[in-house]
Image (spheres, rainbow, N blue to C red):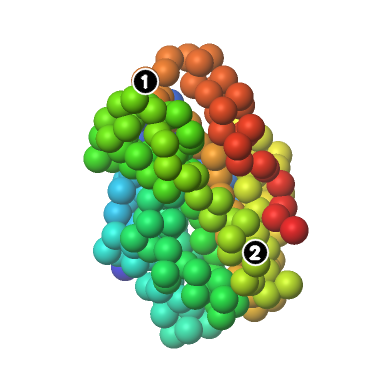
Amino acid sequence: MSENLTTPIGRQAKFCPGCGHPIVLMMLQRILKQHNLEAQAVLGLDIGCSLLAWNYLPINTFQTHHGRVVPTMVGFKRARKNSLAIAYVGDGGAYAIGWQSLFHAALRDEPVLVIVVNNTVYGMTGGQSAPTTLSGQKTPTSPDGFTGNTMYGPEILHQVSNPEAFIARTAVNDPKQMLDFLDKAIKTQQAGHFALIEFLSFCPTNWRTKGIDTVKFLEERLKSVFKVGEIK
């Protein structure tokens, strides 16, 4: 774990142009600063595009193995009960290799915050199909259009989570809702319960979109399949 409390936000950022990750991280930083929680917060990063956030925020941050960020942050929270433990992961790391750990963290009502950035593909390794890939979506591993089932992680987790848990979905083009949900999720962890927010995110590099078409893909495709709001 590295002390990085003076690093300017955005220093040495490695995300692709148009990526939604910087928006999520910026909103997270805004909430932490607003509540004076920067020194208390600890950000665990999964492997994938999420690992590029390792020096993006002026808070303590460390990387984990792929799919292991949730149990790592659960362990950290148990060891340092006064910390604000945040697991930062993509949809592949959360709903594929990391699904077992995520599912049971919700089932046990572990007091951690899980941030899942959902861009419907495995972004770092070339845009292959992921658990959240949309029906008919073309990727390098589904060149004729994806024909499998699309996974709805928050909806499944809601079925096994404590009634006091906070589970929600928002999108990176709705900053007001992003801030509202982050605020509620942090307060949920502070109250001793599990919290998860899924952020529908841009990935123009692997969607092969430019400009307004990137926003349209999120608005017209992702939001028509993944309903935003609190999962109740």
- Disc 2 marks which residue? 158
Q: Nearer the viewer, residue 58 or 49?
A: 49
Q: Residue furthest left?
A: 125
Q: Nearer the viewer, residue 196 or 156?
A: 156
**Residue beneath the point at 53% across and 82% down:** 81
As drawn, 11 above or below 152: above
Q: Quarter-wise, where is residue 220 in the image?
A: top right
Percent x, y of residue 170 = 63, 43
Percent x, y of residue 134 = 48, 35
- Disc 1 marks which residue? 208
**Residue beneath the point at 70% across and 55% down:** 231
State left or right for residue 212 relative to residue 210.
right
Q: Tell me the amino acid under the disc marked 1.
A: Arg
Q: Nearer the viewer, residue 224 or 73?
A: 224
- Asked if the residue at tag 2 contacts the one at tag 1, i.e. Cβ–Cβ closer than 8 Å, the answer is no
Percent x, y of residue 179 = 66, 46
Q: Mark 1 and mark 2: span between their CA atoms?
A: 33 Å
Q: Say which of marks 1 and 2 sits in front.
A: 2
Among numbered discs 1 and 2, the one appearing first in the sequence: 2
State left or right for residue 111 relative to residue 120.
right
Quarter of the rendering occupied by the C terminus:
bottom right
